[in-house]
Amino acid sequence: MSEKVRRTPRQGRARSTVDAILDAAFQLLEADGPDRLTTNHVAERAGVSIGTVYQYFVDKQDILAALAQRRALAVRETIAQTLIERPDMGSVRPIIQALATGFEASPTTRQALLGALFHRGGDAVLSQHHQAFLAAIAGKARLDITLTPESAFVLTHAPIALLRAAAAEQDLGLSPQALEDELVRLLEAYIAALASRQAAARAASTNETSTPPPT
């Protein structure tokens, strides 16, 4: 079924159907893994016909991508609210925890969902969430530092890229708690360096404007 004929859930009943399909897919993923997941199994678990599944989703990968997108949106909203409520260093760990545990799934499921998300949307997925996140906190989060496009890019992309790599490289046996600590240390050090550099720049600017010109 092509993208052109796929339905978009607008009414409450349709949204409930889509939620049931996505919830069923997640349950099956956790129970049996991505290799054994089929649209027929999803339809059966959700209590709908296979035709209903195909009204909203092109194939299995489309279901996984939609499930990943739904969870990624929830994580993004949680992080934005955290930063709005606490725009200081104390928000770093809760943000890392939200990124690491937002999918609330086994490592195999997280890898399958992230793979589907990036397979469908490509690298543009990160850009879309990056722009939406910055829009969500604009004028609301009173940060201690001034973010340039470059520093904002580093802060949003670095932890996501590292967590994605950790999900893909399970054979490394990384400790979730130790990895969380290292990511917190990384971001706190980067933010501290930005704050120090900006403070130095402000001090230099103040000295320049307060020093009388030579006679």
Image: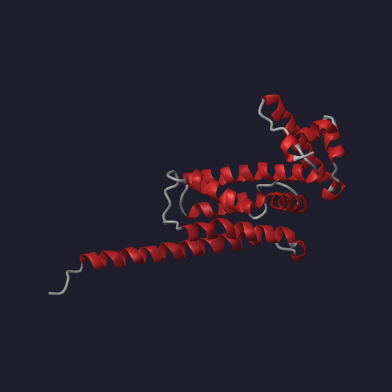
Residue 142: percent from left, percent from top = 42, 48
Q: Nearer the viewer, residue 215 or 106?
A: 215
Determine the image quadrant of residue 147. bottom left
| 125 displayed left or right of 46 | left
Count up the numbered dots.
Answer: 0
In this image, 210 relative to 95: left or right? left
Q: Is residue 154 above or below residue 87?
A: below
Q: Nearer the viewer, residue 72 or 6?
A: 6
Color scheme of the displayed model: secondary structure
Residue 21 on image: x %, y % = 77, 35
Quadrant, the N terminus: top right
- In this view, the residue farthest toward the bottom is 215
Of residue 72 and residue 102, the one placed in the foreground of this image is: 72
The picture quadrant where one finds residue 49 is top right
> At 60% from the left edge and 58% from the top edge, which residue is drawn?
159
Rendering coords of residue 14 (x, y %): 71, 28
For the point 73% across and 47% down, which residue is it?
105
Residue at image location 69% in from the left, 61% down from the top? 165
Check the image and name the residue furthest to the left: 215
Q: Nearer the viewer, residue 207 or 52?
A: 52
Q: Residue at x 56, y 54 (%)?
A: 93
State the quadrant of the C terminus. Answer: bottom left
Residue 79 falls left or right of residue 27: left
Image coordinates for residue 212, horizontal then vertical, percent: 17, 69
